[in-house]
Image (cartoon, helix red, strand yellow):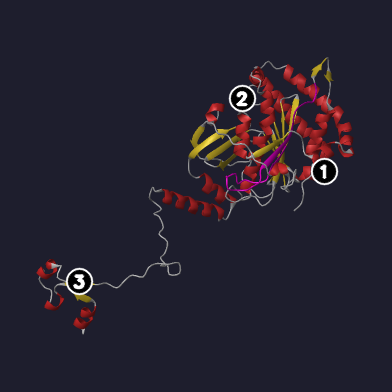
Amino acid sequence: MAASISRRCVRHLSTFPLLNARPGYPPSLRNVEVILPRVPRITEGNEPQYPPVKPSMTSGSKAAKQARRALWIDNVRSSDTPVEMIYLLNKRQRWQEVIKPFSLQSGYGHFFRDVTKTAVVDELPENIQTLAESGQVKTEVEVLTERVIELLMVESFSIRRKKQHRIIEHKERSQSLAQNILNLLISHLGNRFPHLTDAVVDGRCQIKSFWERGERRMQFNGEPVCSVRAKEPLGLFAQTTDEVCNGDVEGWPYNPKEIGIFQNHINPVCFPGFKYQPGHLFPHTQIYGVNFDLDRAERHNIYQEIQDNFGLMAGYAWINALAMYQGYCWFQDIPRPMTAQVIYTDGNRFSFYCYQANTLDLSENGSPWNNVCFQKTSLPMFTDVKDGKVRDFNVEALKLLVAFLINSPERH
């Protein structure tokens, strides 16, 4: 029967003499060609169903690197706790561009806006302006004016009697004034505004935050004088449907080394001023003093640029660090915008910033929203202290200080 089946599948040929020469073939199969069944052509409806071929997780191919990164991102997103998520993000050493809230090189503001995907508005949001002109703020300012003037006189005397280097003098004058004026305002306003009594104030702390923007990895290091944290988030400064939240932010096509920003091969650090613990994980107000050579900045005509961009980087880094303590990152975006208020002073002039982070996903194919920074910079509080008097005291600066602090969080 096997021979009959074989005869059905073959036909005689005389063109294969080598087949006839090989020993062991039966006479009935000599000088024949085997005809195999025709393989059907693959069409749209009958594709073969094979399991996908997965790349090796240990090879150096591009597909393997993409597979390892995809698995790492899935593990980050499925982390059970914020501590586990942060550990997965920072356990490997990487090249990080280390930045501060300022730079002594001209033109760095363009770079700051690019790496945080931030649009800058040179005025404060309407709700803060309305609050600063309200009768409630004016009443508080009338009571506080005399006490603030007395504080300025005491600060001027304590700094003047010390013989220090000008850089140290500028640093101590600005940071001491920032610390004492914030303590004065919180102690005075705390009885009438419960959110200040419930808030946590971190004094002389360090803020460390890291994130990714495309191929760039950023590590922020800042040293605010005080940070005020709340249990509930502040209200929005702008709606995500507004034009300012949906425009394009111009990119930075140059090497950051040109503006004094260099890379370090380090483990990135997330530290918003305190070790992780639940509660009070929303930013409220942060205040910075001078921690650079103020005379050099003014001599090189870049001090105004420092004031214009200080709150931009400080605000985003602080929000990003606190969002990571809540379990969010650029792979797991925040469900709603987060806001923060930042104040900078050099001991005389005050700058006010309202930062709104609409997204932490800064990739090109990520969120369509921009982050926004509203600011009012270089507002002098007084001219100088002479003959035991504070000259040209500016009530507008005090109004904004009070308005920032009494801006109450919203419950969700």
Amino acid residing under circle 2: Ser
- Whether 412 is among the magenta residues is no
SS of the residue under disc 1: loop
Q: Residue furthest bottom?
A: 1
Whichever of callouts 3 and 1 sits on the residue coming sooner in the sequence is 3
Give the foreground label among 2 and 1. 2
Instruction: Return the residue at label 1.
Output: 193
Measure the C-alpha gap from mark 3 to mark 2: 83 Å
Choose between 404 and 71: the one closer to the eye.
Answer: 71
Q: Which mark is residue 106?
A: 2
Quadrant housing residue 321: top right
Q: CA distance from mark 3 to mark 1?
A: 98 Å
Q: Are marks 3 and 2 in contact (CB under 8 Å)?
A: no
Asked if 19 appears above or below 173 in the picture, the reply is below
Q: Which residues are magenta?
A: 354-382
What crowding class fits label 3: few (fewer than 14 Cα within 10 Å), some (14-19), or many (20 or more)? some
Judged from the image, the secondary structure of the residue bearing numbered disc 2 is loop
Circle 1: residue type = Phe
**Amino acid type at image mark 3:** Glu
